[in-house]
Amino acid sequence: MIGGSQKLSVIEKIGYSLGDLAANLIFQTLMNFLAFFYTDIYKIPAGTASIIILTGGFLGAFCNIIMGAIADRTNTRFGKFRPWVLWTAVPFGVIAILTFTTPSLGETGKLIYAIVTYFSLVIIYSANNLPYSALGGVITSDMKQRNSLSSYRFVAVMIAQFIIQVFMQPLVLKFGHGDEAAGFKTVMTYFSIIAIIFFIITFFATRERIKPLPGQKSTLKQDLTDLAKNRPWSILLLVTVLIFITLALKGGMYIYYFKYYLNESSIATFLEMIGFNKFTVWLNQSTGFQWPDDTATAGYSLFNACGILFMIVGIVFSRSLADKFGKRDVFGFSLLASASCLLMFVFYSPNSIANVFVTQIMHGFFYGITIPLLWTMIADVADYSEWKNNRRATAIIFSAMISGLKIGLSVGGALGAAFLEGSGYIAGLSEQKASAVSGIKLSVSLYPGFIFIIAVLMLHWYRINRKTELIIESVLNERRNKSL
């Protein structure tokens, strides 16, 4: 391998991070609004929407494994992974627009259209995001530089998440002129154009520095056998699945939480007390922006903004904490603290608006610390596999993890839709049954908090601590230097 310690420029770190900003303009929309888009805008029954989302996620998981094998065996003058970011840029954008388009096709036609467009988006997302993620594992072999790169990347992710969770609904209202279906299509068109440009920038701004030794060959069977024997990979895969079940479940249910559980007049009083209403009036008058008049929507947007801003603060602390104490220990402690915050939502009444916002801020900070660490831990698992087996298979390891991510998101999203269906939720009603309201509350508190705690317990068997990280880095750098 060609390697050693490589210091990355700020331009390369920013260029790489723009790829995740691009993908997350679309990905975050899927995670936070797809169930709502299908049930309340395209009028697909909640149970059917749940099946589509779940099935699409498992399809994506399968595609990731295939894509991992293909990417590891791709050989071009631009590298193994960078070309895929470029090749998939335009198809990704086009299919994203189609997924959030609502043609009048009748019940069966709408179902077929939703399946075809969503499944196509899942496939192209795998072909784009798997190589992109693997690229982060071969840009540098330096553990500290890798931590830094991951921090840049996830600040970009948080920017995309902030845009989607805070401004998506106001943008939909503004560009749709009250027609949410038209608004979603227009906004997604703008996002897709931006995403295509950013993917191209990522391609030109990055380099692949860690390369397989000349003559290294392995079959897919060998790669999968290595994975099966890699305990850190197995543990991290389960942790990844559990984390993204939680994110999809609570993320998709927050909009219902504000609309049907929290008291509207209490939200309005809180927004007035903190001066948020005056701010939105100024914003509308100064920029022509159309902040939604609906109190629940305004509260939901501010709630997400608070969480995301403090996630970014957490990300800023993440690198220094990981360098000092090791990724695993910092990740586990922060995830446990985040789970504790989620469990606190169980105790809040519909009028406890201030407590809801303060707890969201605390949750955002602690969860933010974990965000870049998960992905650098996956890169460490790739190094661990190379250290043990003398073969590098970066993409197949990342593909397995992203498959876990897809499964988690699909299960979490499907669980949200299934909970709505099972609790008697009826789209469009101004007031829901008590059972539906209770199910919504549990879906943003007890259920996700409990799942996070299980993920923390799993880390007991993840043995790549700070000491092991340093040993792996030293041994691999020595091997790579000998190959020069």
Image: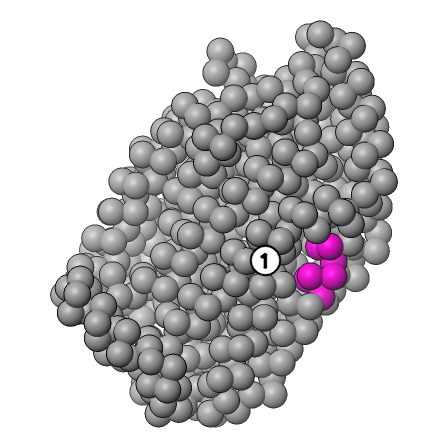
Q: Main secondary structure of the magenta part?
A: helix
Q: Secondary structure at mark 1?
A: helix
Where's residue 65, x and y in %? 60, 36
Relative to 240, is 389 on the left or the right? Answer: right
Which part of the image, by quadrant, shows the C terminus?
A: top right
Is 465 or 324 nearer to us in this picture?
Answer: 324
What's the residue type where badge 1 is placed?
A: Gly
Where's residue 253, x and y in %? 47, 72
Residue located 58% across and 53% down the image: 315
To which quarter of the image does residue 91 belong?
A: top left
Is 5 or 128 nearer to us in this picture?
Answer: 5
Taking 141 as reference, is 265 above or below it?
below
Taking 254 as reference, is 441 above or below it?
below
Taking 263 as reference, is 165 above or below it?
above
Q: Is 56 colored magenta in this rendering?
A: no
Taking 112 as reference, is 432 above or below it?
below
Where's residue 134, x and y in %? 58, 32
Which part of the image, by quadrant, shows the N terminus?
A: top right
Is 472 or 223 nearer to us in this picture?
Answer: 472
Residue 108 in sight in this render: no
Residue located 41% across and 51% down the image: 160
Relative to 324, is 121 on the left or the right? Answer: left
Where's residue 209, x and y in %? 60, 19
Residue 330 in sight in this render: yes
Colouring scheme, one of rainbow, by chain, secondary structure, one colour:
one colour
Residue where numbered disc 1 is placed: 314
Residues in magenta, as a range: 330-336
Relative to 433, is 366 on the left or the right? Answer: right
Q: Is 334 colored magenta in this rendering?
A: yes
